[in-house]
Amino acid sequence: MNREFDVKPSKVIALGLNYRDHAEEFNMPIPSEPVIFMKPSTSVIRDGDPIIYPLGATRVDYEAELAIVMGKTARNVAAADALHYVDGYTCLNDVTERDMQKRDGQWTRAKSFDTFCPVGPIITDEINPDEVNVKSFLNGELRQSSNTKNLIFDVRRIIEFVSSIMTLFPGDIISTGTPSGIAPMRPGDEIVIEVEGIGRLTNKVVEF
């Protein structure tokens, strides 16, 4: 089933360093367990909405990701049962202020600005999340290109891990990480996140 993105998550959980090539890009060791962080619900926007370049920002990056949309309340879910709790999948752009991330030594401020979580354009349960292409295009130029086959932790393991820490509610989003190729955006740029079988999430960057 395909439908327009129409959920209001109570929270967005995202993974860092979940593609081998992205870990290598930052010269980071492959994690032994998922590295997670949160983005507030106030950061969520939809296809076509503007990404606002914050005051004081110096480097705002795109990050193309496959995202999981939860369909049932989930707590302590086993990996073998995890997909039964999924409503579907969508595209997500984990927009990040990279210089703030480095200065702060943790990721909350850098990931949490309003409009820093574009999601959409649809939710679908008609893909195999273990084998879809994930791409980004900045002003029409291909910048990221990988496949979820390269995830360090797959969708089942991610849901098992996150639900062992916190209760997930219907509509909550888990984003599965980004491949290599991240780079800055500037006001006036158009960023497109494309996930095979889902479509293209398109947003423009505007001044504050």
Image (cartoon, rainbow, N blue to C red):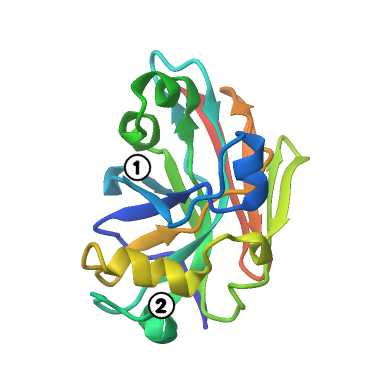
Q: Which residue is depicted at the point 34% across and 42% down?
A: 43
Q: Residue 179, position in %: x, y?
A: 64, 48
6 or 93, which lies in front?
93
Q: Residue at position x 53%, y 47% from top?
A: 17
Q: Does any portion of residue 139 appear in the rendered image?
A: yes
Residue under the point 39% across and 13% down: 56
**Residue identifier under label 2:** 87
Q: CA distance from mark 1 to mark 2?
A: 21 Å
Residue topped by disc 1: 43
Question: Residue at horizontal 49%, vertical 26%?
Answer: 98
**Image vertical order of residue 196 relative to residue 30, above or below:** below
Q: Is residue 46 left or right of residue 61?
A: left
Q: Residue 177, how many percent across, how many down?
A: 52, 52
Q: Which picture quadrant has residue 190?
A: top right
| Residue 136 drawn at (x, y percent) | 67, 46
Q: Secondary structure at mark 1?
A: helix
Q: Nearer the viewer, residue 165 or 182?
A: 165
